[in-house]
Amino acid sequence: MNLSTLYEQKKCVLSFEVFPPKKTDDVRGLYRTLEGLHDLAPDYISVTYGAGGSGEQRQQTVHLADTIKREYGIEPLPHLTCINSTRETVLALLDELAALGIDNVLALRGDRVEGALPGAFHYASELVELIKSRGGFSVAGACYPEGHTEAPSLEEDIVHLRRKVDAGVSHLASQLFFDNAAFYSFEKKARAMGITVPIAAGIMPVTNKSQIERMVSLCGASLPDKLAGIIDKWGHNKAALRDAGIAYAVDQIVDLMASGVQGIHLYTMNSPYVAKKVVGSVQKLLCDLNCTEA
Ligand code: FAD
């Protein structure tokens, strides 16, 4: 199913993000993850794409997306980065996805690698243009409620975001954030600057201290005092921090849903336990929103 239709049909779309297993991981672990996530009936599951974009990484993403569709009957959204790719590799990958009946793609630039030679693509908007000119795919894009780390200002980032959307993006999935006020402010600015497509809010439940420190330094998400206090208090106790992190994420989601968010994109970190706890706590709200459609 074309995901843009899904956003038209539902008031609040629920999606998960998973990543392909490492070479050394037990593949049964991945199947356990998918079984657990499948039970939560997400509207779609997105699959990350190795930043290096090597042939093997590409195949892992395609294979996992195909498994999600064929074996679990859930719509997959494979990610596709372009910074280290040629137009030919991108087109070949799109042909492969199309042959598997996959017709949604999350178009990304990918992180710049220092010293790498400039390739065919500089920005995600160029990838979006290529996919749209090929035809046959609904294209999603990424957005950054607190601004992308390379952008001089949030406003400038939104100017570029508008260009990407105009190139043919039909919905946006946001970078993770912990401060809903930042998301609301970004959404308001994006709407004022003419971006009208649905924006799904990226939520990552905090489950361990080092993971969150790494994410915050990588993506520049601000850490509200309330969450910093939780990490301070329970950072030493894995199980307690996991419970507190889940409760914090649920609180964020309830507030977002009450404010009319069009989608929740849950960064599951391949943990069905955490996804189950979070989704279990908001299932009735989701059902109320989506079952009272006109
Ligand atoms: P772009 O939209 O191209 O933006 C990148 C930067 O360039 C921004 O600062 C923007 O303001 C600026 N810019 C854009 N256009 C122009 C222009 N014309 N002129 C000047 N500046 C411009 N990475 C992976 O490697 N694999 C994944 O699977 C993956 N999944 C992700 C999923 C989500 C939901 C998100 C939010 C991010 C994901 N990333 C992933 C990370 C992403 O690749 C990086 O954040 C990357 O640095 C930017 O990608 P983008 O598609 O947002 O780039």
Image (cartoon, rainbow, N blue to C red):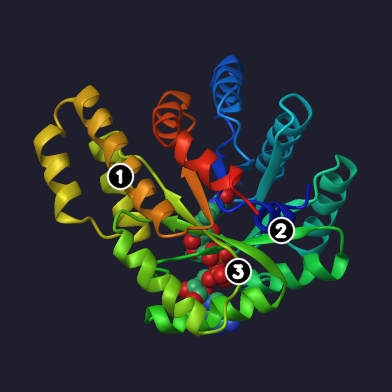
Report whether residue 19 is seen.
Answer: yes
Mark 1 CB lies closer than 8 A to ligand 1: no
**Which amino acid, by three-letter code, is at mark 2?**
Ser
In the drawing, what numbered circle is on residue 251?
Answer: 1
For mark 2, what is the residue?
4
Q: Residue at x 59, y 34 (%)?
A: 20
**Which amino acid, by three-letter code, is at mark 1?**
Asp
Element at label 2: helix
The image quadrant that residue 224 belongs to is bottom left
Question: Residue 114's spot in the image, x, y percent?
Answer: 47, 64
Work out whether residue 122 or residue 160 is closer to the camera in this orientation and state it: 160
In front: label 1 or label 3: 1
For mark 3, what is the residue?
117
Q: Spatial distance from mark 3 to mark 2, Cα to Cα?
A: 35 Å
**Which amino acid, by three-letter code, is at mark 3?**
Leu
**Quadrant (top left, top right, bottom left, bottom right) of the C terminus:** bottom right
Question: Residue 147's spot in the image, x, y percent?
Answer: 40, 71
Q: Residue at x 72, y 71 (%)?
A: 168
Work out whether residue 254 or residue 165 is closer to the camera in this orientation and state it: 254
Report crowding for label 2: few under 14, some 14 to 19, many 20 or more residues within 10 A (C-alpha).
some
